[in-house]
Image (cartoon, rainbow, N blue to C red):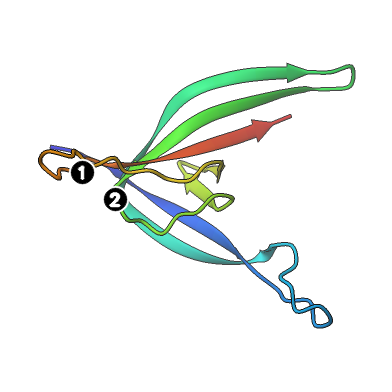
Amino acid sequence: MFQGRTVTRLRPATTTDPYSGKQSAPDWSRVTRLIIENAYVASSSAVQARDANRTQMLTAKSLYCAPGQDVRPLDRVEADGITYTVVAVPSADINPFTGWQPVQEIPLEEGRG
């Protein structure tokens, strides 16, 4: 039996420029949270990026959850005390013959350094 975990999706508030009417940068000081049940985060790869002044580790992971969850690119996901950024449009493949849809895969990235 599948024993998924609970993860939290974080979405920043948006603000509108009063002069132009356009949306400005996301406001991460005000977020809406969505609890996603029976999910799990799995490793994909890690890349070390170096330059003369620092070393950075970029870790690619994927969130697997039920299809149709309200997750968008640039949202953040908290799982096991780590915060990841959604880096691509979530996809949930459907079997064209049976209509079966197993899970939704949501590509994530964590940057350190």
Q: CA distance from mark 1 to mark 2?
A: 8 Å
Name the residue located 55 percent from the left edge and 61 percent from the top edge: 11
Out of 68 and 113, give the one closest to the viewer. 68
Using residue 79 as the reference point, say whether residue 25 is left or right of it. Answer: right
Q: Is residue 56 left or right of residue 101?
A: right
Q: Is residue 30 above or below residue 56?
A: below
Element type where label 2 sits in the image:
loop
Image-quadrant location for residue 28: bottom right
- Residue 9 in the image, given as x and y percentages of width and height: 47, 55
Of the two numbered discs 1 and 2 on the same chain, state the one appearing first in sequence. 2
- 35 vs 45, nearest the viewer: 45
Q: Are marks 1 and 2 in contact (CB under 8 Å)?
A: yes
Depth check: give the residue in front, 100 or 112.
Answer: 100
Name the quadrant containing residue 53.
top right
Q: Quadrant of the C terminus?
A: top right
Mark 1 — residue?
101
Q: Quick one: quadrant of the N terminus?
A: top left
Which residue is at a point 51% across and 38% down the rendered structure image? 108
Label 2 belongs to which residue?
A: 67
Q: Position of residue 12 (x, y in %)?
A: 61, 63
Residue at 55%, 53% in the rendered image: 75
Dividing the picture into quarters, in which one does residue 90 lie?
top left
Amino acid at dot 1: Gln
Q: Residue furthest front?
A: 96
Would you say 55 lies left or right of 31 here? right
- Per the image, label 1 sits on a secondary structure element best described as loop
Few, some or many C-alpha atoms within 10 Å of disc 1 (few <14, some 14-19, many ≥20)?
few
Disc 2 residue type (three-letter): Pro
Image: 96 above or below 17 = above
